[in-house]
Image (cartoon, grey):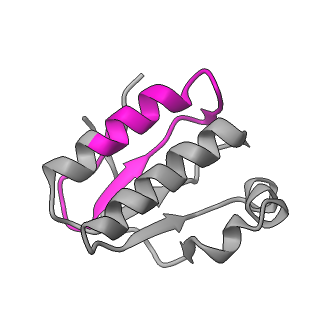
Amino acid sequence: MSVVVSTVQPMVIQPPDVLDVSTAPVFQADLMAAIAASSADIWIDMAEVTSLDSAGLMALVTGLTRAQSLNREFYLCNVSSSVRIVFELTQLDRIFVFNNEELPAKPLAA
């Protein structure tokens, strides 16, 4: 599995459709590498994410923390209502910025 990343600014990253304990470690490593490789703001395109557990949440929190430490914006985009409820139940909707604007470009395979 690899993260799908756009080549334009801001950087658009598309996690796997199931972001759980089995996929989160690789996603987190790919996310950290993508953040380190660019100075662009980060938009996480959650349109394809159908399932999210605590490991997936931690990968996103780690990405957010790293982006903030580098003074970059970090947005969650196209979050479905079934995934959004996970953020609300954990109260992580208070720390993430949800952006429903149109993404700047379709993500390309990394």
Q: Toward the viewer: 15 or 39?
A: 39
Asked if residue 13 lies left or right of residue 81, the reply is left
Point 36% across, 33% down: residue: 29
Task: Check if residue 90 falls in the magenta segment.
Answer: no
- List the single residue furthest toward the front: 69
Quadrant showing the C terminus: top left
Is residue 25 placed above or below 4 in the rendered structure? above
Q: In the rendered image, which quarter is residue 78 located in?
A: bottom right
Point 49% across, 41% down: residue: 15
**Quick check: can you spot residue 5?**
yes
Residue 26 spot, x, y in % from top left:
43, 26
Point 42% across, 61% down: residue: 65
Q: Toward the viewer: 47 or 56?
A: 56
Q: In the rendered image, which quarter is residue 3 located in?
A: top left
**Number of dots carrying numbers:** 0
Residue 6 spot, x, y in % from top left:
26, 51
Point 54% across, 32% down: residue: 24
Residue 68 spot, x, y in % from top left:
36, 69
Is residue 27 placed above or below 48 in the rendered structure? above
Residue 30 spot, x, y in % from top left:
33, 35
Asked if residue 36 lies left or right of residue 30, the reply is left
**Quick check: can you spot residue 48?**
no
Asked if residue 6 lies left or right of residue 55, the reply is left
Task: Check if residue 22 falls in the magenta segment.
Answer: yes
Instruction: Read off the magenta span.
Output: 4-32
Quadrant showing the N terminus: top left
Q: In the rendered image, which quarter is residue 50 located in?
A: top right
